[in-house]
Amino acid sequence: MISEHFGAPIPINSDEPIPHDLICSICMSLPSDVPVVTPCQHLFCNDCLREALSRQQLCPVDRCPVDRRQVSTLGEGTLIKRIWGSVKVKCANHVHGCAWTGPVADYKSHAESCIHDQQRSNALIQPRIDEIQEELRQTKQLNTDLIQKLSRAKKLLEQKDQKLNTLNTSIAERDPKALGLFHGSYDFGRNDVVRLSQLISARLENKPLYIDSNKIFNCVQACFRDWEAGYRDNPQYYYVDMKMLLATCNASTWFTDNQKERIRIMLRELD
């Protein structure tokens, strides 16, 4: 069966016109498939007659009653079928470039494979077009989502960088080396008690890795022993400075538990 949208065959001009009896009285075209004949011997396209009989069971030409079971195709070898089958036609898509010509009996086979059938071509490629358009839509949506995620990620990264820069600046500003409180040696004596207090308080809970807390503790003990010795050359307010140093040490996280206990003993002895 030829698709409904495919055009009827077009007879090629010849010296003799197509017999009227070969023309379907409903569509007024040469049947493209084997014609059917009513009991009253009228010829029609199979599709045309089937549709007509579905509305009323009368012959469209003489209005004689016709039952669908009484309709027959042209018999093989009959003269009228040979005449119909030999009519030369060209494709309905010749305006689209189809150069096929041949007997009408071969038209059905050609119509099913005509590459110039625009509607068939569109019907074949439309699902793929729809699929590509859906893929494109999904790709665009994914691209939009990725751009939004990237934007949010960049914003978060900028915020983290800003916080990190602020933290680094804060650490740098409080770094004992930057503050001139530590020069790599551990020569803190009784004239350096204030500087030693400032060194520890600058990073009270975050001792720099390059500072040895055990050596700092030894310096604190040495300063305390100088206070105990009561040297006459001890700096003015040495007691006050020493108490501030020990209180700072006790509040820090620089020392071990045993060292902390010794610091608290020294604080009590100051009192």
Image: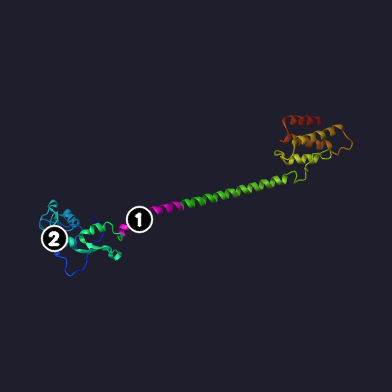
Q: Which residue is mark 2?
A: 80
Q: Is residue 25 visible?
A: no
The residue drawn where x is 54% and y is 50% is 150
Q: How many marks?
A: 2
Q: Does the magenta run of residues contain 13?
A: no
Residue 29 versus residue 225 in the image, above or below: below
| Dominant secondary-structure state across the stretch colored magenta | helix
Magenta span of residues: 118-139
The residue drawn where x is 16% and y is 61% is 84
Q: As shown in the figure, which amino acid type bears the numbered disc 2? A: Ile
**Local SS, label 1:** helix
Q: Earlier in the sequence, mark 1 or mark 2?
A: 2
Please name the colour scheme applied to the rendered image: rainbow
Label 1, label 2: how many angstroms apart (C-alpha)? 42 Å
Q: As shown in the figure, which amino acid type bears the numbered disc 1? A: Gln
Residue 6 image-quadrant placement: bottom left
- Residue 233: give x, y in percent of width and height: 89, 38
Left of 125 or right of it: where is 4? left
The quadrant of the rendering that contains the C terminus is top right
Residue 48 image-quadrant placement: bottom left
Is disc 1 in contact with disc 2, using a CB cutoff of under 8 Å?
Answer: no
Look at discs 1 and 2 and give the one toward the viewer. Answer: 2
Q: Which residue is mark 1?
A: 126
Q: Does the magenta run of residues contain 123?
A: yes
- Residue 13: give x, y in percent of width and height: 21, 68
